[in-house]
Image: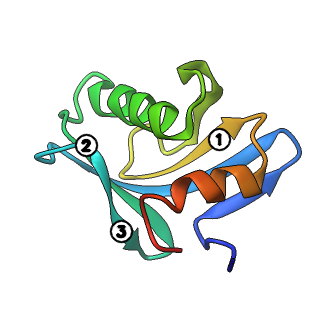
Amino acid sequence: MVPPIFLEARDDGTVIKTRIQANAKNTGITGIHDGALKIGVARPAVDGKANNELRRYLAKILDVNRAGVVIISGEQSRTKRIKVMEMEFDVVAGRLSKFVCC
């Protein structure tokens, strides 16, 4: 498997580079945009609602606790870097491969 360009291995987990579209019809992965995993979020970008929905969705599809999904940069931006704590690169890549072609 070719390593996904939107993932980065870290000692304490894996970082996912994302591009978010708030107020989407449904929450879900829609593809890859400019080297980032594009995710539509069915919540507005107001009062952290879109960020909370993003964390909930990623925790669900990666089968981890929501507390293990941390936005490390881009809290108020469409481009975010999200760390999945204590999950190895290959595991994250494998679970995401069910939703997007890497």
How crowded pointer 3 is (Cα within 10 Å; few <14, some 14-19, many 20+) is rated as: some
Q: Is residue 93 left or right of residue 33?
A: right
Color theme of the render: rainbow
Q: Could you tell whether 7 is left or right of 26 in the image?
A: right
Mark pair 3, 2: CA separation: 12 Å
Which numbered circle lies on residue 27? 2
Pair 2/1: label in front: 2
The secondary element bearing badge 1 is classed as strand
Q: Which residue is mark 1?
A: 83
Q: What SS does tag 2 mark?
A: loop
| Amino acid under disc 3 | Gly
Q: CA distance from mark 1 to mark 3?
A: 19 Å
The answer to whether the residues at label 2 and label 1 have Cβ atoms under 8 Å apart is no
Point out residue 35 in the picture as x, y percentages from the top left corner: 51, 74
Crowd around label 2: few <14 · some 14–19 · many ≥20 (10 Å): some
Dividing the image into 4 quarters, which one contains the N terminus? bottom right
Which label sits on residue 31?
3
- Most extreme residue toward the right is 11
Please indicate whether residue 75 sits to the left or right of residue 65 in the image: left
Identify the amino acid type marked 1. Lys
